[in-house]
Amino acid sequence: MQPIDVTELTTDPYGTYARLREAGPVHRITGPGGAPAWLVTRYDDVRRALADPRLSLDRRHALPGNYSGFALPPALDANLLNMDPPDHTRVRRLVAKAFTPGRVDKLRAPVRKLADELLDAVEPEGRADLLAVYAGPLPITVICDLLGVPQEDRRDFRTWTDALITPDRERPHLMKEAVVGMMRFYTGLIDSKRAAPGDDLLSDLIAVQEDGDALSDDELTSLAFLILFAGYENTVHLIANAVLALLDHPELLRELRTNPDGLAAAVEELNRWDGPSPLAIRRFPLEDVEIGGVRIPAGETVLLSLASANRDPGHFADPDRLDLGRDRSGHLALGHGIHYCLGAPLARMETETALAALLERFEHLELDVPRADLRWRPAIRARGLISLPVRWSSTRRTGF
Ligand code: HEM
């Protein structure tokens, strides 16, 4: 098996995945950090592996040298994406009691208000980098609202978040400072919510109880971190990727304008077609396993390509076509099995709301740079634009 060059996965992900899928179900790759991994490309294998209890998310099951990911302090390791049952089952059950569809519904009107305010601020300019002024600020504000981060702390919170999400490799101390700053901040926030609970998710997570069981302080801090990590960047890029996809397919944009009720279904298809999370969290087999006929030794890193699975012609007819009316049930953009995205209802609601506010506001929206000038982030773990310059005519629409 030839090692493959991962840079191709960042410059032409779908073309590269198509070639890999055809060449074989599982490939040996060297990740950007230099650690070796097995990359799984076909829908059936990826779906099965996502739900396979023999594939652990707990990095303590990694063989030495097989994992070169970012090491969080021990207090932050108690997070759902680094846990297997029974710990995962216990924490997820407690979290699900607090992070309910009702809480997401309550956020719908504030998210719409926020989207409108962000657009009010830039509308007179006639043009902007939509990523910087809209797709970025919206989800971080929603996460602050969700967790109950006080207004006066939000500037620090954003500085740490930016340092954590887009690490400056030249200045690694910034990342360390951000982790320490954020941890201290969350510890203080948990203490103050415990003393004076508010109407927010963190207060609910502190209060949640089941048969005398509750979340520990480490679990609460890890969860707050995870919600930020898992929820922020993905949502930013789903919104921006979706806008770009619609600008690239004006006929679909028109179709959506005439049928706004199709927006929820459109968000699912946009997530399948060019979602922000091309790979699932790395997994480590607890024993030797066979995937697609390839034997993978215990403890080696397994990467499941959600992006490749979602474009597999063995599961989706004409998979490279963005088709808002297709049956896209079973797409894997939000995972599958026990780790299925906990924030899925929120991600959907935010993306739907962001698109609705944008399309209602601007009858005419177009790219403000040649299409070929758009740049994607050079990462195989995240599919997202570096910027999305657009311009608009500010004719307000009365409907959608
Ligand atoms: C478009 C946006 C999003 C995408 C594409 C996405 C994708 C995913 C995927 C693929 C997984 C499963 C990972 C795996 O099994 O390896 C996952 C898990 C998770 N997501 Fe999301 N996510 C999004 C938004 C959010 C939001 C907004 C939140 C919270 C506010 C969130 C919180 C989580 C959490 C806590 C988990 C871990 C669940 C568990 O391990 O039980 N996500 N997400």
Image: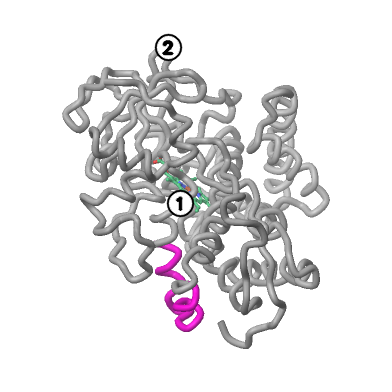
Q: State whether residue 191 is above or below residue 147.
A: above
Q: Which mark is residue 64?
A: 2
The image position of residue 53, as x and y in percent, is 27, 34
Q: Give the Cα separation between the discs numbered 2 and 1.
A: 32 Å
Q: Tag 1 or tag 2, which sits nearer the N-term? A: 2
Q: State whether residue 260 is above or below residue 144.
A: below
Q: Which mark is residue 275?
A: 1
Q: State whether residue 136 is above or below residue 186.
A: below
Q: Residue at x 33, y 50 (%)?
A: 310
**Crowd class of label 2 (few under 14; some 14 to 19; many from 20; radius 10 Å):** few
Element marked by disc 2:
loop
User: Is 264 inside the magenta-drawn segment?
Assistant: yes
The image position of residue 152, as x and y in percent, is 83, 51
Q: Of the residues shown, which amino acid type is indicated by label 2?
A: Pro
Q: Which mark is residue 389?
A: none
Q: Residue at x 70, y 40 (%)?
A: 162
The image position of residue 369, as x and y in percent, is 65, 57
Taking depth in this image into account, of 270 and 101 the one nearest to the observer is 270
The image position of residue 395, as x and y in percent, is 69, 82
- The magenta span reads 253-268
What secondary structure do most residues of the magenta stretch adopt? Answer: helix
